[in-house]
Amino acid sequence: MLKDDFDLFANYFSVHEKFQWTSNKYQLFRRQTDDEFARQNALTSDEVHQKVNNWKTILLTKRNDRSRPCLDDKIITSWNALMLNAYTEAYHAFGNPNYLESAKKLGIFFKSQIQPDGGLWRNYKNGQRTINAYLEDYATVIEAKISLYQVSLDPQWLSKAQELTEYCFEHFFDKKAGLFFFTSAKDPALITRKIEIEDQVIPASNSIMARNLFKLGTLFSNKETVNIARSILHHVQPFMLDYGAGFSNWGQLYLWMLDDYYAIAIVGPNAKEKLKLMQQYYLPNSLFLGSETKSKIPLLAHKYEQGVTQIFVCVDGRCKFPVKTIKNALDQIGKN
């Protein structure tokens, strides 16, 4: 690199004493656009472009001589479950079928690779699974499967969510505390088993589980499950007033319980079309379920009529008179 060219390089990438990181070492960064740099140094845009490409080639060659840092590219279950849930919410909001397809692919991956033998694994890489999943993983996967069911009406996702919930009660639930441990009873014994209740960057595993139980209890019209969710919330309620920011997920559950919470059941051959139309409305205190054929889910059982698609607005397991239009259903919820 010629001396004159280095001076240009130094100005472009801020190689100056005041930007020195350590002795004779610099953090390269730009302080101006290529057009500004060209005007300041009496160069054309093409000349700047050519020089910058040349500099970057030299820098890349030198960087490739260095040992690369370790790459942590394992797949973490809870993080991917959060992504699956985000895909379902994005599909719910925008109706883009690509989001639903991505959510389904993740759901299938969980089923085949993360949950091959009943329980979940914490991480996955190159066909290897090394750590039993934590409550965080179970809670987020259950939440994601409930969400995926609500936008697809595929009962396998709801069934899997129910299975994992039963697994959590068997291996994580502390009957004495009325809350879930963070680690499984199948894991090696520790001095103490942590119970996580404060929401952080990822909501507390117990707050996600309590919301899951409330949703499952609503979807299956199971008051016992709903009451367990209420009991879990009751255990942490005293802490909510002292530190609201750490209990925001709990607060949302509390809001669901303060007023009517609707299970909107759509049954009939056009159930998916009406579901998509219904979900265009903002209904934060509602869950969706449905079937295009007969179903054994309690809120759907005995509601199927050949050739007719009906909407049932239900609260606490009791459904209002069936209607055939979105407008009438919204009227029953009080949204029109």
Image: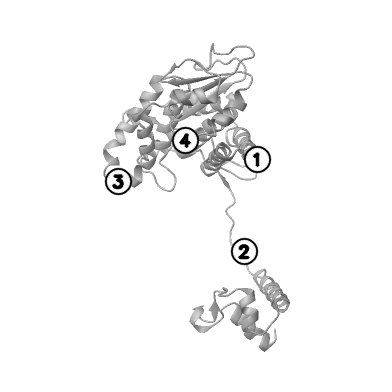
Mark 4 or mark 3: whose residue is earlier in sequence: 4
Contact flag, marks 3 and 1 (Cβ < 8 Å): no
Q: Residue at x 26, y 44 (%)?
A: 242
- The location of residue 83, given as percent across then percent down, is 55, 43
Mark 3 or mark 2: whose residue is earlier in sequence: 2
- The amino acid sitting under disc 2 is Arg
**Along the line of sight, the residue nearer the viewer: 168 or 213:** 213
Mark 3 or mark 1: whose residue is earlier in sequence: 1
- The amino acid sitting under disc 1 is Asn
- The location of residue 288, given as percent across then percent down, is 51, 27
**Along the line of sight, the residue nearer the viewer: 58 or 262:** 262
Pair 2/1: label in front: 1
Q: Which residue is mark 2?
A: 68
Mark 4 or mark 2: whose residue is earlier in sequence: 2
**Disc 3 to disc 2, C-alpha distance:** 43 Å
Res 24 → quadrant: bottom right
Label 4 secondary element: helix
Mark 4 or mark 1: whose residue is earlier in sequence: 1
- The amino acid sitting under disc 3 is Tyr
Q: Which residue is mark 4?
A: 139
Q: Which residue is mark 1?
A: 98
Q: Which residue is mark 3?
A: 243
- The location of residue 154, given as percent across then percent down, is 60, 26
